[in-house]
Every structure is written in structure tokens, then in C-alpha cells.
């Protein structure tokens, strides 16, 4: 829904911008055709800023860091040592076992591979 609102807002801003450009080329006094153009642009910009503020607040409220147990970490580490690139089926099985999503398991492996590159295991 928000993307749709943003698309409408962007489309309105583009139309106003095109009209301004066209009017500048035709040397027609802007105030006689669009006397409230500044107010329209400001309203559109304020609307998009407030939407962004609401979206960012909603995202930060939802995001909570989830830590796994030491047992989960041991299982993931042992699988990582055998195969740092688990397939989708294995990720699904692990997600069911740990009561999480396959995407979170995938991200754990991505982060672990990144960590292995930065700090090789000795």
C-alpha cells in the first residue's frame, strides 16, 4: 500500500516538474496558471517525509534480535564445517528444528561465511 502511495506521489511530483519546465520554456507567468505550486510541492514532500518516518519507526519496532541457544550454535557450526553452503532442504529442516525461518538460517550461514573470511579458524 505504501509503495502505491509513493508511486502516486512521485508521479504527481514528476507532472508538476514537467509543467514547470514546459512553462519556463514558454515564458508563461507561473503564478497565473499554478498560483499554489509551492504549496503543492511542499505538501507532497511533507507527506512523503512523514510516510518515511512512520515506515522507519514501524521497522525499528518490529526488529528484535534473536539469539540462539548454545546447542543451536553447535549444530550450525558442525554443519558449517561440513558444508558452508547448505541447500534449501537442509535450511528448511534446521528452521523447523529451531522454530525459526529458513531465511534466518540462510542469513546465519552468510554471516558465518563472512566471519570465516575475515578471521580464519585456526
Image (spheres, helix red, strand yellow):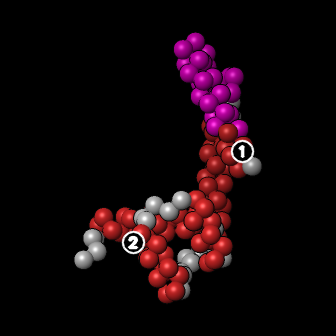
**Helix or strand or loop: what does disc 1 sit on?**
helix
Task: Inspect the magenta stretch and tell me whether residue 104 lies in it.
Answer: no
Query: Real-space Cα distance between discs 2 and 1?
Result: 47 Å
Relative to 62, say whether 13 is above or below.
Answer: above
Q: Residue 5 location in percent, x, y?
A: 72, 44
Which label is found at residue 116?
A: none
Q: Residue 10 location in percent, x, y?
A: 64, 37
What are the residue bounds of the magenta stretch?
A: 8-34
Residue closer to the observer: 70 or 67: 70
- The answer to whether residue 69 is left or right of residue 2 is left
Q: Residue 58 location in percent, x, y?
A: 65, 65
Relative to 63, say whether 69 is above or below.
Answer: below
Give the residue at mark 2: 81
Furthest residue toward right? 1
> Which circle's residue, 2 or 1, is located before the other in the chain?
1
Give the residue at mark 1: 5
**Helix or strand or loop: what does disc 2 sit on?**
helix
Q: Is residue 70 visible?
A: yes
Furthest residue toward top? 26
Q: Is residue 57 visible?
A: no
The residue mark sitting in front, 2 or 1, is 2
Determine the image quadrant of residue 54. Answer: bottom right
Amino acid at each position: 500500500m505504501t509503495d502505491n502511495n509513493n508511486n502516486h506521489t512521485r508521479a504527481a511530483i514528476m507532472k508538476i516538474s514537467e509543467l514547470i519546465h514546459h512553462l519556463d520554456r514558454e515564458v508563461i507567468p507561473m503564478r497565473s496558471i499554478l498560483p499554489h505550486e509551492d504549496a503543492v510541492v511542499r505538501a507532497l514532500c511533507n507527506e512523503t517525509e512523514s510516510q518515511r518516518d512512520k515506515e522507519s519507526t514501524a521497522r525499528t519496532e518490529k526488529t528484535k534480535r534473536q539469539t540462539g541457544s548454545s546447542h543451536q550454535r553447535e549444530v550450525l557450526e558442525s554443519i558449517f564445517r561440513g558444508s558452508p553452503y547448505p541447500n534449501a532442504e537442509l535450511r528448511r529442516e534446521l528452521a523447523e528444528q529451531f522454530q525459526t525461518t529458513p531465511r534466518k538460517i540462510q542469513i546465519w550461514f552468510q554471516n558465518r561465511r563472512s566471519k570465516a573470511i575475515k578471521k580464519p579458524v585456526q
